[in-house]
Image: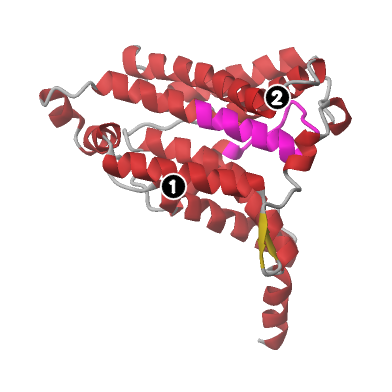
Amino acid sequence: LLVFGSQIENFLSARTFNRIASSVAIVGVVALGQTLVVLTRNIDLSVGSIVGFTAYFVGMQLNANQGMPPALAVLLACGVGATMGLVNGLLVAYGRVPSIITTLGTLAIFRMLLVNYSDSKTVTTDMVPTWVPELSQQSLFAIGELSVRPMVALAIAVVLLFQLVLVYTQFGRRLYAIGSNPEAARFAGLPARQIVLLAFVICGALAGLAGFMFLSRFGNITVVAAQGMELQSVAAVVVGGVNTFGGSGTVVGALLGAFLIDLLGQGLIRWLGIS
C-alpha cells in the first residue's frame, strides 16, 4: 500500500496534473459539442477528422500569414469546423440519413481531404508564429504549484457558458425536448430539423476550436492528427452521464468524463505500460 500510495503521489504531481489538464481541455471542448449532438439522439463520429483538418489548415494559413492576429486564427478554425458540421447537419436533419452512417462517411472524407491537402507535408512549430506554441505553455495564474493555462481557462469558460445555455435558454430546453421525445416535439411544433442542424454546426465549430488548441499544444501536425479523438469524446460523454438516447445530461458532466478518461489513460501508460 505504501508503494502504491507513493506511485499515486508521484503520478498526481503538479507537472503531471498540468499536462493532463491541457489534454483534457482539448477533449473536453470536443466532448461539449458531442454532448449537444447526443442530446438530440444523434452522434458525430467525424469530430476527430475535423480537429485534425482544422489544426493543419490553420497551421498552414498561419505559415503563409505570419501577422495573422490570434483572434482571427481562432475564428478561422471555428469557421472551418462549422462548415464541416453544416455538411453533417444537412445530411442528418434534411437528408434524413442516420447520423452514425453520415458521420462515419464524413470521418473518412474529411480525413481524405486532409491527406490530399497536406500532400504528405507536416506543419511544424518553426512554421507558425512563436505565439502559437507559447500559448499552451503560458500561465494565467497559479494555485499553489498548479498553474492555470489559457487553454484550460478557455475550455472551462466555454463549458460553463454552454451549461448556462442548456439550462436557461430556449435553444437548450428544445435540445432536451427533441432528444427526450422527438415525436412529441414535432407535434408541439418545435423546429426539430433546424435544432438538429444547429447542434451539428455548433459541434463542428467547437471541434474547430479544439483543432486550434491542438495546434497550439502539439505544434507538429501530420495527417493522423487527432485520430481516435471521436471515440474519446463519445466515451467522455457517456462516462459523464449524458444519455445516449437523448434528453438528459450536462456539459459539465461531459468535461468531468473527459478528465476521468484521460486520467485512466495516463495511469495505464505510466503504471502498466499499456497504450
Is residue 216 a member of the stretch shown in magenta? Answer: yes
Q: Quadrant of residue 88?
A: top left
> Where in the figure is residue 42, as x and y percent of width and height?
37, 31
Compared to residue 244, the image places residue 120 above or below, namely: above
Residue 139, visible in the rendered structure: yes
Q: Residues within 10 Å of mark 1 (few under 14, many from 20)?
A: some
Label 1 element class: helix
Amino acid on which disc 1 is placed:
Leu
Point out the tag, 1 or 2, that comes first from the N-terminus.
2
Amino acid on which disc 2 is placed:
Pro
- Identify the residue under disc 1: 160
Q: Which residues are magenta?
A: 205-229
> Where in the figure is residue 9, as x and y percent of width and height?
69, 76
Compared to residue 49, the image places residue 119 above or below, namely: above
Compared to residue 61, the image places residue 157 above or below, namely: below
- Identify the residue under disc 2: 69
Mark whose residue sits in front, 1 or 2: 2
Is residue 212 a member of the stretch shown in magenta? Answer: yes
Decide if residue 168 is on the left or right side of residue 90.
left
